[in-house]
Structures are given as structure tokens and as C-alpha cells.
Image (spheres, rainbow, N blue to C red):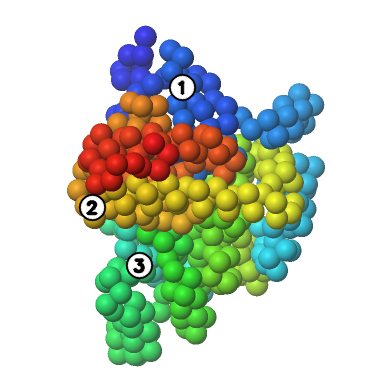
Amino acid sequence: MNDIFETLESDVRGYCRTWPAVFAHASGSTMTAEDGSEYLDFFSGAGALNYGHNNPELLRPLLDYLASGAVVHSLDMKTPAKRRFLETFQRLILEPRNLDYKVMFPGPTGTNTVEAALKLARKVTGRQHVLSFTNAFHGMTLGALSVTGNSMKRAGAGIPLTNSSKIPYDDYFNGETDDFMWLERVLEDSGSGVDKPAAVIVETVQGEGGLKAARAGWLRGLSDLCKKHQILLIVDDVQAGCGRTGTFFSFEESGIEPDIVCLSKSISGFGLPMALTLFRRDLDAWSPGEHNGTFRGHNPAFVTATAALERYWADDDFQNDVAGTIAALHRGLDAIAGSVEGASVRGRGLLAGIVFPDVDAAGEVAAEAYRRGLLVETSGPSDEVLKVMPALTIGHADLERGLGILAESVRAVVGSRTPALAGA
């Protein structure tokens, strides 16, 4: 019955090879396969489901909207749903953080917002070059690939990826070298032969690149350097944003204010396609229609996005609850990592994981976890990091159960130095 997936669908498919179940239903942090098998979800749609599957607080307004006969597709035309989203986003997200950004709807995906950010930075500055970081991931279209570090993904482009250079991410040299020493020197030396870039694009946590998290001080240093040399700073918050690190934007802890911010994945709140590119008002140099796309006005996503903001970000209660979930997750991960010699925890917030000294261990643990009913993926250039992304709304019992399955899976694959693991 399932032969159609192998005979008709392209070989490019990936996740279904790791998790071959045919998933039929989902609720909260549980996915159910056609055969009735249940899986606890510590993947959350690669971060697109921060509020869980089929969240009833978001489902109800969506169903009401669809049943009302209201506009579904509108390109960039004005609709009540778009108006309400913009008003809510300004009131609950931008104004409380003193951020005076314009909002652009660039298309439905993360790579769309990155492409728009790069294009705008080049247009505004008149410069072509963009700096990105070792092990960065920013998307699969050509512009986004040009600032991505993964060699396998870059190779898929089929053409040279130009006008971009990679520089060391935080702690790339294990703290032995001042990360910005080289960049500062060449930017100040007119004889260096290095052109001033239009922008620097950075993830505060490298979601696909191994879960390395930039220190707040390092981000401030990067921001200061960009300001000093009039280089635009782009923060790619596609995976780390919308609360996943504990605050709505992942850069809030560092106190920086990026020139451009890329959002997607969980901005719709419900897993519906949606993306935003935010930028300083003075950077809004677009001519009407200069950057467009058919699916910029997906009104069902505006509806669920608005509902998510109103339900979870109207005050500090949800953020405080998430802080408790983050603390519990990291206690569990620390205990599991402590049971394996040489293992350590990486990441920040609910975008975290464990790196093992054996580069094959993370994949084997993820496979074992799937057999035990838990969905987790891997991260890093060699898939050497076990990546954990539960929903922000996950209940304590489900979180502890998932940590227990992880502990059992680690013990089954790599053994243990201690008699008990967190959650086991």
C-alpha cells in the first residue's frame, strides 16, 4: 500500500527514511501512525510547531475563519486578517521590545525571508558581498545556499555560489583566538583587498549546524563591529525565534538590535506556511512590486499567527512557563550527557541537544529512540549531535517521559557510567 511513496515520490525525501511510519493523526506532543502506534514528538516540525500539533486554541479560530467564507489567498492585498495580525504583532511583540521595524511578507518559507534580507541589504548598501559563518544554515535556494556552510547542501546548487565568505562562528578556535581580530584588521586596512560587505548574517543558535550557541557577549561584539563599519546585521531567527530560546526573539538576551530579522517556521503558530522579514524603517528601499510572490498573503496563517500571539505573548506568563520547561529539559540533558564520557550539552532553550565523542552515536541513539516511540533528529556537519526540540507547550509528564526514552536509548547504544539517568 505504501509503495507509492517509493515509486512516485522523488528520492530527495529525507525524514520519512528515518521515520518510516505513516503518520495519520497528531495532537499536542503526540503523533499517531496509521497502525495506531504513538510517538512522542521532540521534533516539532523542525521548529514549525512551537505550540504543538493541532493546538485547539489556534484550531478554533482557523476553522471559524475557513467556514465564514473569508478570503484565503490575497497576494499582498489588504484583508481584515492581515490587518489584525499586523496590529497584534506591533502591539504585543514590537512595541514592548522597543523595536521599530517595518514588516515584509516575502513568501511562505524560511529561505524566502533570507533571500529577501540578502537582496535588501545589497540594494540598500550598493555592495554585493555578504559574510556568514562556519556551519551556518540559511536555506536551500541559491542566495540562501551561498551563505550556508554545509558542503553537501551547497553542492546541490550545481553552480558556483559567489559573493559570500565564511568567517569563524563563536568559539570556532576553542577560545584561543579573538574571533573578530582578522575581520577588524582587514576592514580597517585599505590594502587588504577585502571589500566591505553589505551585511553579516548570523544564527544565534546554529539549528542545523550542530547546535552551537553564540554567547551574548560575542553577539554584542559582532553588532558593535557591524555598526562601526556600517555593515548591516541580519539575524536569521527562522528556527531559534518565536520563543524557542525562551524569549520571542533569540537575540533579546544579548541586548542587540539587528538591522534585519528573518522569521518563519512557528510565526504562523499552527504549522501553516508563513514568513516575515523585519527591518529598520530607513532600510525600506523597495519599489512597489520589486520583490513579490504568489503566496505572501495566506490569510489562514495570519489568523493562527494572531491567535498564537494573543494566547501566548500578551503577558509574561507563557514566557515564565517556558523558562521552567527549559530548566527541566537541560537538567535532564545534563544528566544524560554526564553518563557518557566525553559527551556534552549544546544549544540554548528548547533548541538543544547532546554531542557525543563517537560521531555515529547521535544517529544510532535517534534511531533507537524512534523504535521506543520518540521522534528526535540529529544536527551538525556529520550528524554528530542529538537534537531535541519539544513544543514550548509540552506538559511536564510528556517532557519527563521523553527524557526517560532518551536516557534508555543512550544507555542501549553507548552504555552508561552511572547507575541512573534523568527521567529513566
- The residue labelled by disc 1 is 38
Q: Position of residue 208 (x, y in %)?
A: 37, 50
Label 3: which residue?
Answer: 169
- Mark nearest the camera among 2 and 1 is 2
Q: Nearer the viewer, residue 333 or 148?
A: 333
In the rendered structure, the answer to whether residue 405 lies left or right of residue 279 reads left
Q: In percent of the image, x 64 and y 33: which residue is there?
A: 55
In which quarter of the view is residue 414 placed? top left
Q: Residue at x 73, y 29 (%)?
A: 60
Q: Amino acid at mark 3?
A: Tyr
Q: What is the quadrant of the C terminus in the image? A: top left
Residue at image location 70% in from the left, 61% down from the top: 94
Above/below status of 24 relative to 165 = above
Question: Does residue 220 appear in the picture of this structure?
Answer: yes
Q: Nearer the viewer, mark 1 or mark 3?
A: 1
Going by the numbered disc 1, the residue's amino acid type is Glu
Disc nearer the start of the sequence (2/3): 3
Can you say which quadrant of the picture contains the N terminus? top left
Q: Earlier in the sequence, mark 1 or mark 3?
A: 1
Give whichever of 318, 75 is nearer the camera.
Answer: 318
Q: Name the secondary structure under disc 1.
A: strand
